[in-house]
Amino acid sequence: MTSNSQISALIDRIKATPRQPGVDEIRIPGERAFRSREQALRDGIEIDRVVYEALKSLHLD
């Protein structure tokens, strides 16, 4: 079974791989979604006014 430290070491090796010209970052699967979730938890998310009002009316029913 793979340990967390082995996984972390593998991720570090992947991210240390030389990049092609124009490539700023090497991401692993799920990394962008994780960052988006962290940002949403920290900063909140924007909701369209119409959607907000519809959700609010459902809550009041």
Image: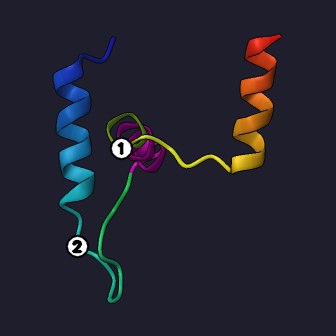
> How far apart, in angstroms, are the residues tagged by discs 1 and 2?
33 Å
Which stretch appears magenta?
28-39
Q: Position of residue 49 (x, y in %)?
A: 69, 48
The residue to which callout 1 is attached is 43
First in sequence: mark 1 vs mark 2? 2
Q: Residues within 10 Å of mark 2 (few under 14, many from 20)?
A: few
Q: Position of residue 34 (x, y in %)?
A: 41, 39
Secondary element at tag 1: helix
Q: Amino acid at mark 2?
A: Pro
Q: Amino acid at mark 1?
A: Asp
Q: Position of residue 31 (x, y in %)?
A: 40, 45
Residue shown at 76%/41% (left/top)?
A: 51
Secondary element at tag 2: loop
- Specify the quadrant of the image occupied by residue 3: top left
* Viewer-closest of 37 and 6: 37
The answer to whether 42 is drawn above or below residue 49 in the figure is: above
The answer to whether 21 is drawn above or below residue 54 in the figure is: below
* Viewer-closest of 18 and 57: 57
Residue shown at 20%/33% (left/top)?
A: 8
Q: Position of residue 18 (x, y in %)?
A: 22, 73
Locate residue 3 relative to residue 27 in the image: left or right: left
Q: How is the image coloured?
A: rainbow
Tell us which disc is closer to us: 1 or 2: 1
| 59 inside magenta stretch | no
